[in-house]
Amino acid sequence: MQPAVQPKRRVGVLLGVALFVLALDIVTKIIAVKELTNRAPVRVLGGFLKLTESRNPGAAFSLGTSLTVLYSAIAVTVIIVILRTSRRIRSLPWAITLGLLLGGATGNLTDRIFRSPGPFRGWVVDWIQLPHWPVFNLADSAIVCGGILAVLLSARGLRLDGTREQR
């Protein structure tokens, strides 16, 4: 009897997705700060989408604006947990999901570390606004998409190792 073939690890995919998200987030924030600071919002798609530079000291929806250091600590913890978990990933969908979460968390943490008013207290650059929705950035989008995918994968019973839960 032959041993079962173990699917290969997907760490490279996870890190590739994370680096892509991080690079795109950093580049778009640099452009947003350069082109949108001290300027009226730019209307796109017939005004459905607005591009406007905003600084957010809090979490999503500007909640907890005095807790920036705590949010930085949470982001560091999330990043460490994802990196530790990555050794067990053999599922391509989970690698993509955790790559989105890792890239998004790292993108916003980068702002918190390097932007004013100081290390681990910096304000996150947001620049995308939809109707009736707070201003956000690509890192936020990656985190939301990763979160939705994680819920869907869990609901379908797909494990990190690529196997399915028996129901």
Image: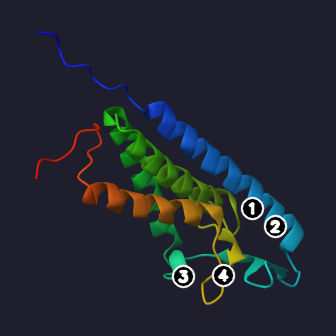
Q: Residue at the bottom extreme?
A: 132
Residue 132 higher or lower than 26, as above or below: below
Q: Which residue is mark 2?
A: 33
- Looking at marks 3 and 4 on the same chain, the residue that comes earlier in the sequence is marked by 3
Quarter of the figure that contains the N terminus = top left
Disc 2 crowd rating (10 Å Cα; few below 14, some 14-19, many 20+) is some
Residue at (87% x, 65% y) in the render: 34
Disc 3 on helix, strand or loop? Answer: helix
Q: Which residue is mark 1?
A: 29
Mark in the foreground, 2 or 4: 4
Q: Would residue 120 be visible to someone looking at this image? A: no
Q: Would residue 111 be visible to someone looking at this image? A: yes
Q: Give the amino acid at mark 4.
A: Leu
130 and 143: which is toward the camera: 130
- Looking at marks 2 and 4 on the same chain, the residue that comes earlier in the sequence is marked by 2
**Location of residue 68 in the rendering, given as x and y in whole percent from the top left corner:** 53, 71
Spatial CA distance of label 1 from label 4 is 17 Å
**Location of residue 157 in the rendering, given as x and y in whole percent from the top left corner:** 23, 52
**Location of residue 120 in the rendering, given as x and y in whole percent from the top left corner:** 57, 61
Mark 2 touching mark 1, by CB under 8 A? yes
Q: Which residue is mark 3?
A: 61
Q: Give the amino acid at mark 1.
A: Lys
- Looking at marks 3 and 1 on the same chain, the residue that comes earlier in the sequence is marked by 1
